[in-house]
Image (cartoon, rainbow, N blue to C red):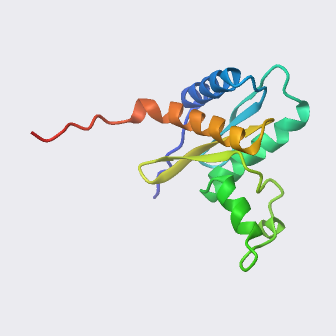
């Protein structure tokens, strides 16, 4: 039997707080979604000023990054490749998206969750999602001691 590693509610709260703080420093009003290893929603924040139309894309970005085990930037680039590109509808899952702003959360070689951000430029969304991922991983970092 296989055990699935996944993030939990406390991890999601840390991720939400980190994205919110980073967005406020950039004067950005975004929606942030945190998904577990299965891509299912654990936490959602729609910051003051973020439009309601940004909720579904943020959720889809987190879902996609977790389910496919790739950042959505990679999926977007692969789908647009002139030689090997593909239609995202081929996944037969309407929640899959190629919108940039979804970042996977990896721990010990496994995807354990993801962050999706919507409501800013693609680069800003991705940077904010990365801040959320870093905050969720922080408690799990091991101290590496230098050899004498």
Residue drawn at 65 percent across, 55 percent down: 67
x, y (%) of residue 17?
62, 23
Residue drawn at 90 percent across, 31 percent down: 52
Position of residue 20 in the picture relative to residue 90 (left or right): left
Residue drawn at 80 percent across, 53 percent down: 95
On the rendered image, what quadrant is the N terminus found in?
bottom left
| Image quarter of residue 124 | top right
Vertical order, 78 against 64 (above or below): below
Q: Nearer the viewer, residue 82 or 99?
A: 82
Position of residue 52 in the picture relative to residue 143 (left or right): right
Residue drawn at 78 percent across, 55 percent down: 97
| Image quarter of residue 140 | top left
State how many labels appear. Answer: 0
x, y (%) of residue 133?
56, 38
On the rendered image, what quadrant is the C terminus found in?
top left
Q: Nearer the viewer, residue 39 or 27?
A: 27
| Image quarter of residue 35 | top right
Q: Residue furthest bottom?
A: 83
x, y (%) of residue 87?
81, 70
Q: Nearer the viewer, residue 20 or 90?
A: 20
x, y (%) of residue 68?
64, 59
Vertical order, 25 against 73 (above or below): above
Vertical order, 125 against 14 (above or below): below
């Amino acid at each position: 039997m296989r055990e699935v590693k996944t993030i939990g509610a406390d991890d999601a709260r840390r991720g939400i707080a980190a994205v919110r703080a980073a967005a406020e420093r950039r004067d950005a009003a975004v929606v942030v979604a945190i998904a577990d290893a299965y891509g299912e929603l654990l936490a959602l924040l729609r910051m003051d000023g973020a439009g309601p139309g940004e909720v579904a894309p943020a959720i889809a970005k987190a879902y996609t990054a977790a389910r496919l085990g790739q950042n959505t930037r990679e999926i977007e680039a692969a789908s647009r490749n002139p030689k090997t590109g593909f239609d995202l509808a081929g996944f037969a899952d309407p929640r899959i998206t190629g919108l940039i702003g979804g970042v996977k959360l990896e721990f010990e070689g496994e995807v354990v969750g993801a962050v999706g951000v919507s409501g800013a430029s693609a680069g800003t969304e991705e940077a904010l999602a990365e801040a959320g991922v870093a905050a969720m991983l922080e408690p799990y970092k091991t101290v590496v001691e230098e050899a004498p």
